[in-house]
Amino acid sequence: MSNLTDLTVAEIRDGVAAGTFSAREVASAFNTAVESGRALNAYIVETPELALKAADAADAARTSGELKPLSGLPIGMKDLFCTEGVQTTAASHILEGFVPSYESTVSAKLWAAGAGMLGKLNLDQFAMGSSNETSAFGKVISPWRDASGKDLAPGGSSGGSSSAISARLCPAATGTDTGGSIRQPAAFTGISGIKPTYGRCSRWGIVAFASSLDQAGAMARTVKDNAILLEAMAGFDAKDATSLDLPVPQWEANLSSDLRGKKVGIPKEYRPDGLNAEIAALWDQGIAWLKDAGAEVLEVSLPHTQYALPTYYIIAPAEASSNLARYDGVRYGQRVLPDGAGLQDMYAATRAAGFGDEVKRRIMIGTYVLSAGFYDAYYTQACKVRALISRDFDLAFEKCDLLLTPTAPSAAFPLGEKQDDPLAMYLNDVFTVPASLAGLPAMAVPGGLNSAGLPIGLQIIGKALDEQGVLNASLALEERAGFTARPEKWW
């Protein structure tokens, strides 16, 4: 038998069901991997006992013939999802020590489906970042290395999730995607990740960043694994006003890489002057792969794409400044109370000590664009442009069924390289932000390695609610790319 930590979600599920190995053996193998992989700093909290408890329940269920869809599967949980009885921090000191008395809807669905938790995964603080360097609990390191030997960024904000999956510290993990925080880290570490249609997964119990953009999704090594996990995560939730009251499709059962009759659009605006040559070459290869799968490929236009990043970096910080106002040191989390301080002094001291620099930067931007003299000039205008960006997609989808683009403008970069230049960091989201603004499903799939031996990926964007189309096209790419590269263990 191969190393249990090398198995996919589907292989673990099916192996436990068949009795090839026990769920406890799987959980124990991953617990050992988590412990030996601490150099990556992918986990903030480890919960080996919870993984074993779920595994024992799975083994008992197999004996009694009552297996659940995810029985025997241990996963990592991004530390943005509230987990009952387990510290939830959003990677911020201001929530350090906060132990929820309730479970997020998404995590509750996963536990109900039989999954177990290996631990809470590190991320950029409050999901604000593209390199996982803003965490109050230390930066996450990618398991990949290039010739320079420098520590590389695993992407962000779901960098703990991407690093852990790529290093085989978990077979799959939850992520959240506000402007690319599932797709970009997936591309950086050679795994797959899907952001479903806005509203497919409940946001209840997820620490909020930007409420009109945040969406939970799945991350794993294969397209099939993502379909399996997303099926368990999705579904209507009356506690979330933006949740879609729709049945969850059988995405895994309907997977097909036959794209005959499908039209795939190539947005011309996604090929700017100066696009990395290796990224452009992979994109061309992706077009050839989709044609081989039977798809018709045509050029489309998304004319307002050039405004997507500035629009996002007005709307997202504005919503963040509103959402993060609740962290005041009164009800939960950290409190800093200087001697003789009044209430306002406590607010200021708590937030100054609890929030990191990037979070403070975005709160300040958001507060500015929402202020009385600038609301119409910035926030209102951004909302209008967002509507235009969404309309661009609607018009494009009158001509095609799916879109193919790169996922990120480059491969993973060394940690620290862009930390002092926020604008350079924000450009990492240039290909992922438009789909987030429009609330569309989108998936990242690894396509190959660049000349430095680092993963680079492709992105499929679909119509609203067409996760099946996105998964199927992604499967066609996955089959033709044949990506089997993995990081050489150094940790």
Image: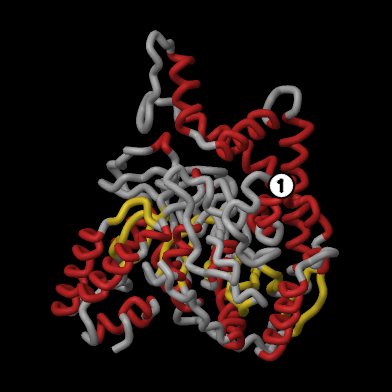
Q: If the image is split into quadrants, where does the N terminus sit?
A: bottom left
In terms of secondary structure, where does tag 1 sit? Answer: helix
Tag 1: residue type? Leu
Number of numbered discs present? 1
**Residue found at x 71% / y 57%:** 430
**Residue found at x 73% / y 75%:** 278
Compared with 244, 259 (above or below) is: below
**Residue found at x 21% / y 65%:** 52
Compared with 210, 342 (above or below) is: above
Q: If the image is split into quadrants, where does the C terminus sit?
A: bottom left
Q: Which sits in the foreground, 467 or 41?
A: 41
State the image coordinates of residue 402 (x, y, percent, origin top left).
68, 73
**Residue found at x 67% / y 88%:** 260
Kindly tell me whether residue 294 is visible in this rendering: yes
Q: Quadrant of residue 479?
A: bottom right
Residue 371 shown left or right of residue 344 in the figure: right
Say which residue label 1 marks.
423
Q: Which sits in the foreground, 259 or 24?
A: 24
State the image coordinates of residue 94 (x, y, percent, origin top left).
42, 34
